[in-house]
Image: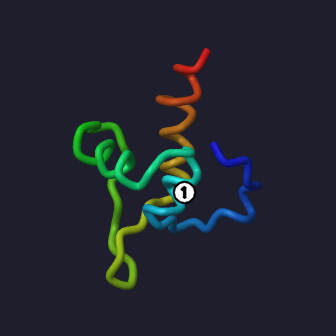
């Protein structure tokens, strides 16, 4: 996970920013979107997919961080 402070991560994150947050490729994020029903669903903003930062952080806490140790 990228250690950016909350203040530097926008509330509406692009798929690229989500990938950077998790330290994975955009392709991996797309695979999670397709295969993991728990992965946050994006919404469209200005014609592009965006994710809510709060939902991404919650997913991290419940599904990624907890499985690393």
Residue beneath the point at 47% across and 29% down: 63
**10 Å crowding of disc 1: few (<14), some (14-19), many (20+):** many
Q: Position of residue 11 (x, y in %)?
A: 57, 66
The part of the image, by quadrant, that contains residue 57 is: top right
Q: State left or right for residue 34 relative to residue 38.
A: left
Q: State left or right for residue 25 relative to residue 65.
A: left
Check the image and name the residue furthest to the bottom.
Answer: 46
Q: Which quadrant is the C terminus positioned in? A: top right
Check the image and name the residue furthest to the top.
Answer: 69
Work out whether residue 55 or residue 66 is closer to the camera in this orientation and state it: 66
Q: Position of residue 3 (x, y in %)?
A: 73, 47
Q: State left or right for residue 65 relative to residue 3.
A: left
Q: Which residue is mark 1?
A: 53
Work out whether residue 43 or residue 4 is closer to the camera in this orientation and state it: 4
Q: Position of residue 37 (x, y in %)?
A: 26, 38
Its colouring scheme is rainbow
| Element type where label 1 sits in the image | helix
Residue beneath the point at 53% across and 37% down: 60
Q: State left or right for residue 34 relative to residue 9.
A: left
Q: Which quadrant is the N terminus positioned in? A: top right
Is 13 above or below relative to 36? below
Q: Position of residue 31 (x, y in %)?
A: 29, 45
Residue beneath the point at 33% across and 54% down: 41
Is 8 above or below relative to 27? below
Residue beneath the point at 61% across and 68% down: 10
């Amino acid at each position: 996970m990228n250690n950016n402070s909350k203040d530097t991560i926008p509330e509406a994150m692009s798929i690229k920013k989500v990938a950077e947050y998790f330290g994975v490729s955009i392709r991996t994020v797309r695979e999670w979107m397709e295969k993991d029903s728990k992965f946050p669903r994006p919404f469209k903003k200005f014609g592009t997919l965006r994710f809510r930062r709060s939902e991404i952080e919650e997913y991290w806490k419940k599904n990624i961080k907890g499985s690393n140790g």
